[in-house]
Each structure stands twice: as C-alpha cells, then as structure tokens.
Image: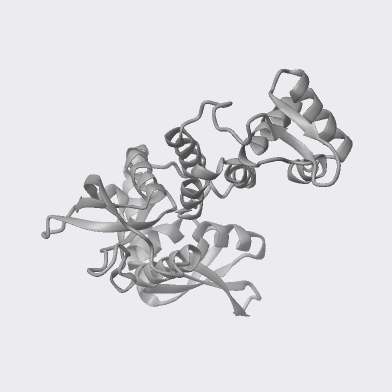
Amino acid sequence: MRADRLIQALLLLQGRPQITAEQLAGELEISVPTARRDLEALAMAGVPIYPTRGRGGGWRLIGGARTDLTGLTEGEVTSVLIGLAQGGAGDPERIAAVRKLVRAMPAPFREGAERVAAATVHDVPWGQEEDARAAATVEHLQRAIARRRRVRLSYEGSRRGSVELVPLVVGSRGVRWYLLAAPPREDAPVADGGRMRTYRVDRIRELETLDAQGEPPEGFDTSAVWTAMVARVEDLRGTVRAVVSVRPWAMKALCDQFGAHAHALDSRADDGSPLVEVHAHRVDALAEQLAGWSSVSEVIGPVEVRAALHALGEQIVERYAADDD
C-alpha cells in the first residue's frame, strides 16, 4: 500500500511546480505526518526532490516538473486512460484511478487525457460479456477524441460510402458500444451539433483518423447528450408494454433484470401483489423475457403478450413431452 502511495506522490510532483505535505495529504487522503514521511522517503530513495522552507514553500523536483521520470510518452499515457475507461468506468475504484491519473498528468498530456475520460461512457450490466472485436475500434475512436481529430468511416448498410465525422462520445449500453458523431461544419473545424448521429461500433467496417482538426460544439455536454440518446433509443425499442403482477419478494429481482425497461406502478393486483409495467421492442421478445418469471409473476395484459406466452408454453410442452414417449 505504501509503494502505491509513493508512486502517486511522484506522479503528483511531476505534474506540479511544487507540492506541500498538506496538499499531498489531501490528495492521498492520509495524515500530514504520513505525507511528510512519504516525501522524505522519496528523497532518501534517490528521487531528485528537495524541500523549500518558509512561506510559499513545499517540495519540488530538481529542474521543475518533468515527465522523464516515468518514461511515459503521450501515447502511452493515453493508452493507460483508454484501458481504464474501457475496463469498467462505472467501478468506483476505476473512477478514482482515472481521476487521480488525470490530476497527476503533466500539463502537456493532461488535456488529451481529460478528453478521453470525459468522452467515454461505460455501462455493462453484471453477467454480460463484451464483444472483444469492438475494443480496437473503440480505442481508435478514443485516440481521435484525445487528439481532437476527425475520422473517416464506412458503415454497414450505408449506401453513401465513407463519411467524414467529428467523434464526440463513445459509450456502451449492455455489451454494445456506440459512437455519437457529427459531420464538421463548412465554416469551421467544429462538429455540426444539429446533424449528430448514433453509430453502432460493431457495424463500423473501416476507420481512419484524419489530420484535420475536429472540435465539439461550444458548450457540448457529454452526459446530457448521452442521456438523451439513450432515452431516444429506449423509446424506439420499448413499443410493446405489459402489466405484470409479481410476488413481493421477487419484485426487486425482476426490476433489476429488466432495468430501464421496467417500472413499478402505484396500483396493485386483486390479490394485493405489486404491479410492474415492462416493455420491449416486440411482443415475442417480451414474452420470451417474461417466460422465465412465470413461477413468480402473471401477465395481466395485454392479451397479445398472454397469447405469446401461451404459445411458448405449448412449444415447451411439445418439445419435452416427446422425450417421455
């Protein structure tokens, strides 16, 4: 644990002209005496740091903030951030690691690192595995965002051939990655926010980073744009809805399984069981998802979903009854 702290302290020293024991203690969430001992330990280990006394004093690297102590290049720094972002940005430990790394980056590297961290949204539910084939494409896009560069891509099913875009956000929903991007404006190297589109990363067939600059629109809010995109896609997918009566003890588990596709209703069934509304993009898909909950739930309506469940039940009986003959 102390070795980890010493490395963090060294990174912080590289990113700043100087740091006090009090500041280091605040960054690492340790006591001031511990921070002072860590700084002294770095000096005794041969790291070229020295203290300056009096008002405005602190600990400094000889020659100022330097980047050659770790030997990391800008590309290597970006790779570290990309790996953390793709590996599960929702994990509290990873969030803390990204935050500390970005703060500790030397100034020339920090801007690109901040863009990667801010422009990546990662949301993979438990029990699902990601498509490893998309990882290289996601990394390519993240590097373009870090460098503020446009990309040229060809997209599966498009008859337009390749298109030139400014990549703005890469994010995952479940096991699938998406790109939010827009063509550049004609009068400036800035994305045209009114022409922004969503692309599935696994449908990108060819991808090339261009030398041309590509900036996000002024005041671009990554979180708000991503949330709006998710809501729009969920509305398109969730066109079939059903009301389900659920046993109270199974209520949370069912809602967790359906996630954003379920919400509890204020009313209750005749037997007092809670009611949940669930939705999906097709009747058969909704019936298939609900079939596994038949022992603890009952679909109240609509009749189309009940009929689809009945048909599924008949198929199961027919298939497995044959094994008993």
Determine the image quadrant of residue 49: top right
| Residue at x 80% of width, y 41% of height | 57
Residue nearer the viewer, 158 or 251: 158
- Here the colouring is one colour
Q: Is residue 72 visible?
A: yes
Residue nearer the viewer, 262 or 167: 167
- Indicate the position of residue 214 as horizontal and vertical percent values: 32, 57
**Is 148 above or below relative to 282?**
above
- Indicate the position of residue 178 as horizontal and vertical percent values: 36, 55
Determine the image quadrant of residue 171: bottom left
Q: Locate the C terminus by quadrant.
A: top left
- Indicate the position of residue 243 as horizontal and vertical percent values: 49, 74
| Residue at x 74% of width, y 24% of height | 42
**Is 118 above or below relative to 33?**
below
Determine the image quadrant of residue 32: top right
Q: Is residue 325 visible?
A: no
Q: Give left or right: position of 2 versus 168.
A: right
| Residue at x 43% of width, y 58% of height | 289
